[in-house]
Image: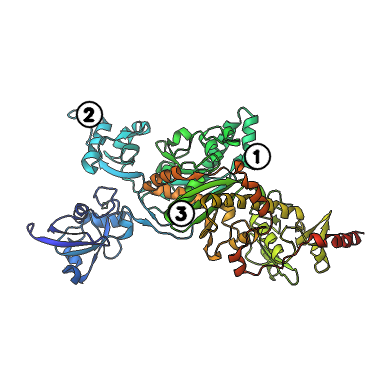
Amino acid sequence: MPDKEAKIVFTPSGHRGRFPHGTQLLAAARSLGVDVDSVCGGRGLCGRCQVTCAEGEFAKHAIVSSAGNLSPAGEAERHYGERRKPLAAGRRLSCQAEIRGDLVIDVPPESQMHRQVVRKSAEYRDITLDTSIHLYYVEVQEASLDAPSGDLERLRQALAREWQLDELDADPSVLTRLQHALRDGGWKVTVAVHKQSRIIAVWAGFRRDAYGFAIDIGSTTIAAHLCNLTTGEVVATGGIMNPQIRFGEDLMSRVSYVMMHPEGCGELTDAVRAGLNGLIADIAADAGVERDDILEATIAGNPIMHHLFLGLSPVELGGAPFALTTDAALDLQARDLDLGINTGGVVYVLPCIAGHVGADAAAMILSEEPHLLDAISLVVDVGTNAEIVLGNRERLLACSSPTGPAFEGAQISCGQRAAPGAIERVRIDAESLEARFSVIGSELWSDEPDFADSIAGFGVTGICGSGIIEAVAEMYLAGLIDEDGVVDGSLAERSSRLIPDGRTWSFVLHDGCPAISVTQNDVRQIQLAKAALYAGVKLLMDRAGLHQVDRIRLAGAFGSHIDTKYAMVLGLIPDCDLDNVKSAGNAAGTGARIALLNRAARAEIETVVREIEKIETATEAKFQDYFVDAMAIPNKRDPFTCLFSAIQRPARKSVSGTRNASRRRRRKRVS
Ligand code: FES
């Protein structure tokens, strides 16, 4: 009865219309602008177009909807179930079902082309899926003497006819594969199209999935998320130590290496690319994904990592005016960067903010979105060079501050990287001055009965960045150090954990082999690092005319592991309601992932970055004053009212007054 019409409502979008009986459901959806996915062009191969028919009376729409108002499942749907997996109860392929009566049709999230990729944890934000790469399955007219055009031209015609994709370019790698793909696939191929304008890959037959990597190149670690570009899911994640570490632990020593060795830049570039390719290969193998199926990568990294990965000399970034080769976002070919993905693959490099605030900070902004909020946000990537962003939707400022490697456990007497056996949590009883701790690799505290068994494989080996932060903060709260950071040797009478150490005192956390202590110099190193960070924050607050911030996010491998309360007790970050201070996890990696999955986010961050006010801490006269004030715990001048309304402030005392007495006691003890 082709002249009969049916009323159709699509949920959740609410699109509605009238269609003649016999209309294909997918065609009806498309004509109304309903967001339904498809890779196979309605051939019943991809399963992306699944919908559910709602049953019952819908008074609001004046519709009685029933699955019986759709054509019965046919051969193609049965075939799909046999080839892949049977359709769930009530599900239909909208490209196969025909309208036979009134319907309310639900388009589930996984069938929507621009679906939300739903947050699974703090690191996984909701992202609207809108990738720069799409797959298209096409049937190409066979080559014949009667139609003497080239294979590429006939592929283009098919894409224009079936998918309305006109005037597509083709990557040279596609040309080398096209003839095989067409003949192997029986003239049926799947192509990947970048930005609706360029064919970058071709495969024989039908391909359902394409993949991409979101990569954060840090000076210490490289982290990568493998994402399915057609579903938005993270299918695997991994990380490695940055192999450039053998050329220098911190950024400046790597720049120095390049300055002193003519071939140094190439060596560092080769090292990071080789490390990254090994990581890509391992993650892909774990996930069962072929290199050829990986079509895109997005890259975030600090300016020096950014330059070295791209093969650019970082020498100019080693000193004022910290000139970047380019601060723009870059669209590059994967093969030009020796990246081990599909040879036609593409790479998007996020923009840098300034010569010392990089693409990792740009990615961090995408992840934390301070530019979309009314509230004043402070977002800090706490690393050897802290990158700091402050502001809200009206104004954003950024700077970096040279915190040095103390937060990563370097320059600390028993310091080590975060690894099994490293002390990461510390508690000190203010009355007894007894300490307990936990180490990475065990859930137990050191005073719990099974602790020794739980660490049998690795023991207590040192103290990592988050551990030293907690140790120093707890020492301050217990009165073991004063606000100037001086270890109070006069308390040695009350605690055997305080031991003389030259002209100063150390506090023993673990009396084993090796013994783990916090020395006076360790406390100083943490004070220097946190004072540099805080001084940078104060400069930004000054420039913005702010006296307080509404929310704080700590990002980066270290920032996301420190207890935010202890960070504030030490005065690493300004006073703020503790409930509004949170870890942002690997925000740079999350931002790279957002850029991978959502094209609009790229344009957004490119605009935001252009408008950020950049502050150069090295040339600001006030930096030194703020730094000196911030050497105190938590700060010489700033009162930290919110913090001390939530926790007990230790009684103020000056250890220097008791120093002479403690020196006498120490001499006695040593003799
Ligand atoms: Fe591919 Fe329906 S569009 S199965």
* Residue 366 x %, y %: 45, 50
Q: CA distance from mark 3 to mark 1?
A: 36 Å
Outermost residue to the right: 671
Where disc 2 sits, the SS reads loop
Q: Mark 1 — residue? A: 248
Q: Which residue is mark 3?
A: 392
- Label 1 beta carbon within 8 A of ligand 1: no
* Mark whose residue sits in front, 3 or 1: 3
Residue 607: x %, y % from top left: 41, 44
Judge by depth and name the residue closer to the eye, 345 or 151. 345
The numbered mark, 2 or 1, whose residue comes first in the sequence reads 2
Q: Confirm whether residue 423 shows in the render.
A: no
Give how far across and how far down residue 378 sits, in percent.
52, 55
Distance from disc 2 to disc 3, alpha carbons, whole Å, reads: 57 Å
Label 1: few (<14), some or many (≥20) within 10 Å? some
Mark toward the viewer: 2 or 1: 1
* Labels 2 & 3 near each other (Cβ < 8 A): no
